Image: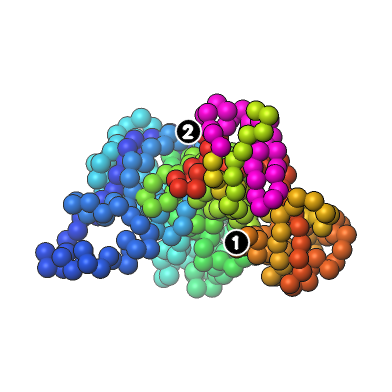
Amino acid sequence: MATVTLKHIQKIYPNTEAPSKKKKKKEEAPVEEKKYKLKVTEEGVVAVDDFNLDIADKEFIVLVGPSGCGKSTTLRMVAGLEEITRGELYIDGKLVNDEPPKDRDIAMVFQNYALYPHMTVRENLEFPLKLRKVPKAEIDQRVNDAAEILGIMQFLDRKPKALSGGQRQRVAIGRAIVREPKVLLMDEPLSNLDAKLRNQMRAEIIKLRKRINTTFIYVTHDQTEAMTLGDRIVIMKDGEVQQIGTPQEVFNNPVNTFVAGFIGMPRMNMFGGKLLKRNGEYCVQIQDSIIQISKDKQKNLAAHNIGERDVVVGARPEHIILDNVDGAMIDGVVEVSEMMGSSVHLHLNSLGRDCIIIVPTLDLKDNSALETGANVKFTIVPNAIHVFDPETGKNLEF
């Protein structure tokens, strides 16, 4: 268990190409630059830029973002597997930039398990302790304790090839926790498992977290994992931190359109609209529908002296009300209807944009709204409206 502090961490991969190739790249951008929009300087490609984070003792931090955003690179810098270009990394108040991985008192669980195939489960668990010359009696105790916690006692004499994916991942986690590290790093440990096993292993990790005294840093591209596991979430894009907060904070108060679209399943809907003031109070206009904004959001917008302007209006699928009553409602056409049991996910084309509405089946008054090509009308719950700048993508409340 330990605190971890990252101050202005930067990782730059030097450009080692020959000058002639560099000239060619100016004409045609590399695939990575096109896809991920990472910064390219004279020094090279900036994979992580100005990363700042204070992690408390025993806190569970999740780094989340799309592929190529820099989250695994950040984790590897904490582990000592990647050199830090600039910035300072502290573990328990000690600067460890130049400390080798073996001296950082960390353990890491990889995506591909990284088990020794010729060793039994017990031998895999014992191996890191034997390297440290831990007494035999203590090794046996730690291995048995870890196997008991993870429910793999019956597999101790098997080799990895005789185990399922979920069982192998438990062994990989066990090999990490027998060391009793100050910090446990996990790099997309569930991505190779099927959906059912992922759900089971998420629950196992939550239980494990409560039983061992260590600080967790967990990397994933799956926002469901991030929301269910993390005390706080660090959302990254193109090597930069977009927002840090609890799962509820980033869900309720996204700082920009990227966070709003990335966190939440299905993703937040975005509509072109206008921010207006009527009798001193803010409202949004979408098509012919004018929707009053809640009092809390009124205060936030007023505090930043936001005037009337074009905006992007965000609303989560569960915060949209489907109704075919006459009046100033927003129009949509049903393109796809997904029956989910307790609810229906309606995919609409509304004002030229894709839109998803979650409708509880008990609230459905007319099943004709489920038919492809049906014309429907809807509005948005006032206290669930988010207002973004159409150019910068920033939430105008913050």
Q: Position of residue 86 (x, y in %)?
A: 25, 41
Name the residue at 51% across, 66% down: 192
Residue 49 appearing in the image: yes
What amino acid type should be assigned to the residue bearing mark 2?
Ala
**Given this view, does label 1 or label 2 mark the residue nearer the observer?**
1
Residue 199 appearing in the image: no
Which is more toward the observer, 370 or 253?
370
Q: Which residue is mark 1?
A: 353
Mark 1 is surrounded, within 10 Å at the Cα level, by few (under 14), some (14 to 19) or many (20 or more) other residues, namely few
Whether tag 1 and tag 2 are in contact, CB under 8 A, the answer is: no
What amino acid type should be assigned to the residue bearing mark 1?
Arg
Q: Position of residue 182 (x, y in %)?
A: 43, 39
- Asked whether, in this view, residue 229 is left or right of residue 136, the answer is right
Q: Secondary structure at mark 1?
A: strand
Name the residue at 64% across, 42% down: 284
Q: Position of residue 351 (x, y in %)?
A: 63, 60
Name the residue at 78% across, 71% down: 371
